[in-house]
Amino acid sequence: MNSKKSSREILLEILTIIDYKDNKDAFISKFLKLCMKKSLLDILLVASDNDKQKIIELSETNLTPEQLEGKLKDIVGKDILNSNLEKSTKEIFSQYLETLYPTLSTSQNQSLRTYLNSL
């Protein structure tokens, strides 16, 4: 996602565009946790046994996605984590958009597409 805006800011803007009625912060936190979990699974497939144990221990904590991301960077490195997070987020976000687009009004659809193209 965009380096000028955080994932949280982008998701908040999208939820505003689509007129999401429920708790936006709760949705965003769940979405980011899902992305982090998918990324963790992908990393676990290639991590060393020592790193796997550290990652598993971290995944069992109650850290926010942002806190977990910071700790994971120390274990697997910034580049590996960022690459996996970007891949996971794109996959999950694409699936969400496929589900979302048919439910939007024409104006919401156009506003969302315009916003996404601006990123």
Image (cartoon, rainbow, N blue to C red):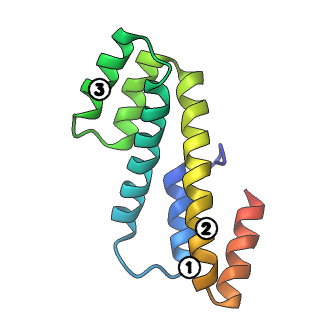
Of circles 1 and 3, the one toward us is 3
Residue labelled with disc 2: 97
At horizontal 71% and vertical 63% (from top left) the residue drawn is 116
Question: Residue 73: x and y, percent?
Answer: 46, 23
Badge 1 or badge 2: first in the primary sequence: 1
Identify the image quadrant of the C terminus.
bottom right
Q: Position of residue 81 (x, y in %)?
A: 52, 28
Q: Amino acid at mark 2?
A: Leu
The reply to whether discs 1 and 2 touch (Cβ–Cβ < 8 Å) is no
63 up-or-down from 31: above or below: above
- Residue type beneath disc 3: Ile
Three-letter amino acid code at the position of disc 1: Ile
Number of numbered callouts drawn: 3
Q: Residue at x 58, y 84 (%)?
A: 103
User: Label 3 vs label 2: CA separation?
Assistant: 30 Å
Q: What is the x, y in percent for residue 4?
A: 65, 46
Tag 1 residue: 18
Task: Indicate the quadrant where residue 25 lies.
Answer: bottom left
Q: Is residue 94 left or right of residue 117?
A: left
What residue does disc 3 label? 56
Alpha-carbon neighbours of circle 2 within 10 Å: few (<14), some, or many (≥20)?
few
Answer few, some or many: residues within 10 Å of disc 1's Cα (few below 14, many 20 plus, some between 14 and 19). some
Q: Earlier in the sequence, mark 1 or mark 3?
A: 1
- Residue 97, quarter of the rendered image: bottom right
* Secondary element at image label 2: helix
Between the C-alphas of marks 1 and 3, the distance is: 36 Å
